[in-house]
Image (cartoon, rainbow, N blue to C red):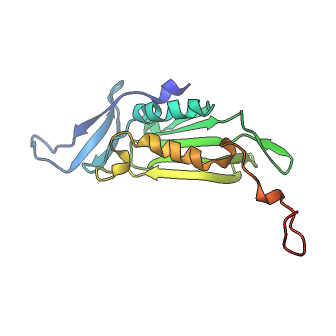
Amino acid sequence: MIEQSLFAVKEVPAIMGISTNNTGHKFIVREDNNSVLSCVTNEYKLVTNQEVMDKALPIIERNHGTIDEVKTFAQGARSSWVFKFRKNPITIQGEKLFPQLNIKNSYDASTQVDVLGGAFRLVCSNGLVIGRILGHKSARHSIWNSKLQNGHIGSLVEETIENMDVLQPPRPNLQNTLVTLGGNPS
């Protein structure tokens, strides 16, 4: 399932005519079929889907997450992965939901490396989703962005999961604490 999104890509300098002058742009090209996924500036930092998954999967698996959905769009220019954490269901108004981690990446500069954690549910056949966001981290595809250097993609996933309280060991829940008129909890 996940393999469909892990094809190899390469950067190819964008040149005009027979000139070898730097245009300040480059193409992101699929290696398997040589299709051009995008033309971006040289300041665009290529982060491959393989890099994202190499950093994310060990952390997700350590927290008992499993792949639930993989989507690619525009011949692979954009990818989306959904991981569910079925060991830790939560109940909201009597409905059992599983926390999930949504990860996105693009080769066409349409989205950042994006990690969103929470509990969500489909409410309409048109795709409307409601839920509660429990953690969100992202990093722009830029050569100047230190979040994409030296393997920090894993920290985006780690920090988002840490913010997903439902995945952490139980803590006292103030929501269920009864407060009396005198202000002293019972």
Residue 184, by quadrant, is bottom right
Any part of residue 154 in sight:
yes
- The residue at 29%/49% (across/down) is 143
The location of residue 27, given as percent across then percent down, is: 28, 41
Q: Is residue 104 left or right of residue 35?
A: right
At 72% from the left edge and 40% from the top edge, which residue is drawn? Answer: 98
Asked if 12 appears above or below 139 in the picture, the reply is: above
Q: Which of 127 and 122 is in front in this view?
A: 122
Q: Nearer the viewer, residue 4 or 152?
A: 152
- Quadrant in which the N terminus appears: top right
Q: Is residue 116 visible?
A: no
Q: Where is residue 60 in the image (x, y as percent from the top left)?
A: 56, 34
- The residue depicted at 17 percent of the width and 50 percent of the height is 23
Decide if residue 2 is on the left or right side of residue 178.
Answer: left
Quadrant showing the C terminus: bottom right
Looking at this rendering, what residue extends furthest in the right direction?
181
For image coordinates 77% across by 54% down, the residue present is 173
Could you tell me residue 25's position as x and y percent?
A: 23, 48
- 7 left or right, relative to 101: left
Image-based side of 16 in relation to 101, left or right = left
Q: In this view, does 66 lie above or below 94?
A: above
Q: Residue 121: percent from the left, percent from the top?
A: 73, 46
